[in-house]
Image: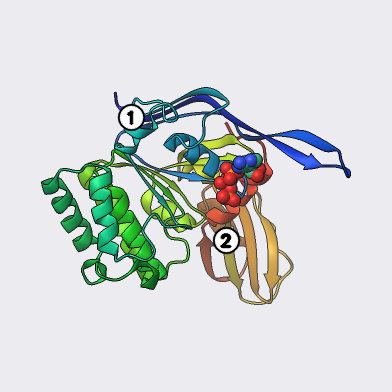
Amino acid sequence: MSDLIELDGVEKVFEVRRKTGRLRREKREVRAVDGISFRVPRGEMVGYIGPNGAGKSTTIKMLTGILTPSAGRLRVAGLDPSRERTKLAQRIGVVFGQRTTLWWDLPLYDSYKLAHRMYRIPDARFRENLDRCVELLDLASLLDVPVRQLSLGQRMRGDIAAALLHDPDVLYLDEPTIGLDVISKAKVRQFLRDLNAERATTILLTTHDLTDIEQLCKRVMVIDHGRLMYDGALAGLHEAGESERTLVVDLERELPPVQAEGARVVKVEGPRQWLAFPASASAAPLVAHIAQAYPLVDLSVREPDIEAVIARMYDGRPLY
Ligand SMILES: Nc1ncnc2c1ncn2[C@@H]1O[C@H](COP(=O)(O)OP(=O)(O)OP(=O)(O)O)[C@@H](O)[C@H]1O
């Protein structure tokens, strides 16, 4: 079994009641997840992104067994999450950036001792995993500090260690770098890269920080309105979003907008002009034409911003 996460036509429908009058209530269905299918093989690190309310948390809750799907088939490490939740707990680790699984008033180390007992981790393995996390996540000076006194970045590193002491095969990370400073973000990302490379831990990462995705995931899934809009290489997102690159040209003097096939001027500021052209096209013929027909002094090409690409996708229809 090489696919650790398997979803086939998974749906989750919530029934919500809304007050419509003094005594009347209306029943309404919310399709939080609307027929999602994907597979994640062992050792893959995948980004799972989408706008607010897209259905990301609901998917993760089904993958941990907290919620039962309304329809479809779901397996994690060969187990049915909601039916075999206790067994599954031994195979997965979960980190929620917005809340902690650590004991607020206890020193960090006490939470780890509790995990040791709760997961029945053999002593030698616990020691080995703890030492490794302490070293790589820089936790040595924090073990005796009550969790409530830790900074957000320290607490997040503490949470990641707690999720890994029992050697899970799958790690779900929900906004693991939210609110962290640049240095803490870099530490967390480096740790995840090492973990994935050394232990082949399968990682599903939900984030609003697209740099997390760019630095960690080769594959990205985009979800919106409970549906999968894109599943593929990060590089392919640009094409899927029909994105554009920008050619910035500096001319000798202020001139009317440049005329060039396959490109359009989107901004003019004195002698500088910005031309948008499809990201999939080569800039070479465009540059050659402008150099030949206009008094060109300098130029640069700007790559599309991935956030803009995804924003365009959110406005559109399914892309495959
Ligand atoms: N327990 C619930 N009862 C009713 N509706 C719910 C429940 N949980 C989620 N929803 C609805 O399901 C949809 C998907 O929510 P979900 O929390 O999965 O989105 P999300 O992608 O995680 O968003 P965010 O980025 O804001 O966390 C939303 O419309 C939400 O209001």
Residue 320 % position (x, y): 57, 31
Q: Quadrant of residue 82?
A: top left
Q: Is residue 57 above or below residue 135?
A: above
Its colouring scheme is rainbow
Which residue is at the front of the view, 114 or 89? 114
Q: Which quarter shows the N terminus?
A: top left
Q: Which residue is mark 2?
A: 247
Which residue is at the front of the view, 284 or 192? 192
Name the amino acid, label 2.
Leu
State yes or no: Cβ of the residue under disc 1 lies below 8 Å from any atom of ligand 1: no
Name the amino acid, label 1.
Ala
Is residue 197 visible in this depiction of the protein? yes
Residue 52 % position (x, y): 61, 50
Mark 2–mark 1 distance (CA, rounded to whole Å):
48 Å
Between label 2 and label 1, give the one nearer the viewer: 1
Which residue is at the front of the view, 152 or 211? 152
Q: Which residue is mark 1?
A: 77
In the picture, measured across the screen, residue 265 lies left or right of residue 95, that is right
Tell me if mark 2 has few (under 14), some (14-19) or many (20+) residues whose alpha carbon lies within 10 angstroms of its own: many
In the picture, measured across the screen, residue 111 lies left or right of residue 121, that is right
Secondary-structure class at tag 1: loop
| Residue shown at 54% from the left, 37% from the top | 230
Ranked by sequence position, the earlier of labels 2 and 1 is: 1
